[in-house]
Structures are given as C-alpha cells and as structure tokens.
Image: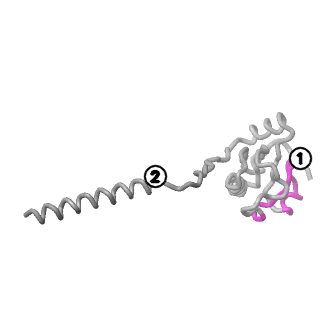
Amino acid sequence: MNKILIVALILLVLLGLVAFLVTNLKKGTSSEPAMTVSKAVYKKISPQEAKEMMDKDPSAIVLDVRTPAEFAEGHISKALNIANETIGSDKPEGLPDLDAKILVYCRSGNRSAQTAKKLVAMGYTQVYDFGGLNTWSYGTVK
C-alpha cells in the first residue's frame, strides 16, 4: 500500500509540474516585444457626406477605382484613378501617405468596398467608402 501511495504522490507532483509549465508557456516567455495588431476599419459614408468632406478638406484624396475606360467616360472632379484590380498588397504609388484621408468610389459600390478593405489592411487609417458613381448627384467631368 505504501508503494501505491508513493507512486500516486509522484504522479501528482509530476502532473502539477506539467500544469505549471504549460500555463507559463501560454503566457509567453519570449523576450521579443509583443506586436500590436491593427483593428482599423474603413467607414461607409453617403455621397452627401463625401461631398461635404471634399468641400471642407481639399487635401482629401478622391479615389476612383473603376477601370481607366470607365474613368474616361466621366469621373468626379480631381479624382485619382487607380483600378481596384491593380491594387494588391503593396501601397499604390499614388497613395504614399498612410494617414491621408481617402474617399473611395466605383460604379456601384462593390469595388470601392473591396479597395477600402485592401487599403485598411495595408495600414491606411482614414479610408471612407461612399459607394458608386450611380448614386452621385453632384456632377462629373470628362
């Protein structure tokens, strides 16, 4: 009976040691600093809100993510054209400042939402999606 008690006591001590080690490993004993994960999101706004932002902040970038052919048919004045399909995981050349206010639109709102998500994933902090040109009532230029 003493042997069974000693074996049980040893197993209990080993189990406690394993539990202690697992708990400490989960807490992270790495000497490397923890990385902060960005939880930035883009904001969906109305065309009216976008127009007000454009009027109040002339430095805001108006980004048309339609194809160059669609852009040539008519676009919002002073818009920059970078097609959604050409935007990958690298920062687009025309958008060097991660903190710039960027107002994104396309034809119907689908590509603008895709682009807004991509830009936020790249680290852009002020991305606003105002949908499609089909709901824009403030005029366009060619």
Q: Label for residue 27? A: 2
Image coordinates of residue 48 in percent, x first then y, are 75, 38
Q: Residue furthest right?
A: 142
* Residue 70, x across and y down, in percent: 84, 60
| Residue 88 appears anywhere in the view | yes
User: Which secondary structure, mark 2?
Assistant: helix
By what rule are the colours in the image chosen? one colour
Q: Which residue is mark 1?
A: 77
Q: Residue furthest top?
A: 56
Residue ID at (84%, 58%): 93
**Amino acid tagged 1:** Ser
The residue under label 2 is which amino acid type? Lys
The N terminus - image quarter: bottom left
Membership of 108 in magenta stretch:
no
In the image, 6 versus 101, the foreground residue is 6
User: Residues in magenta?
Assistant: 68-86
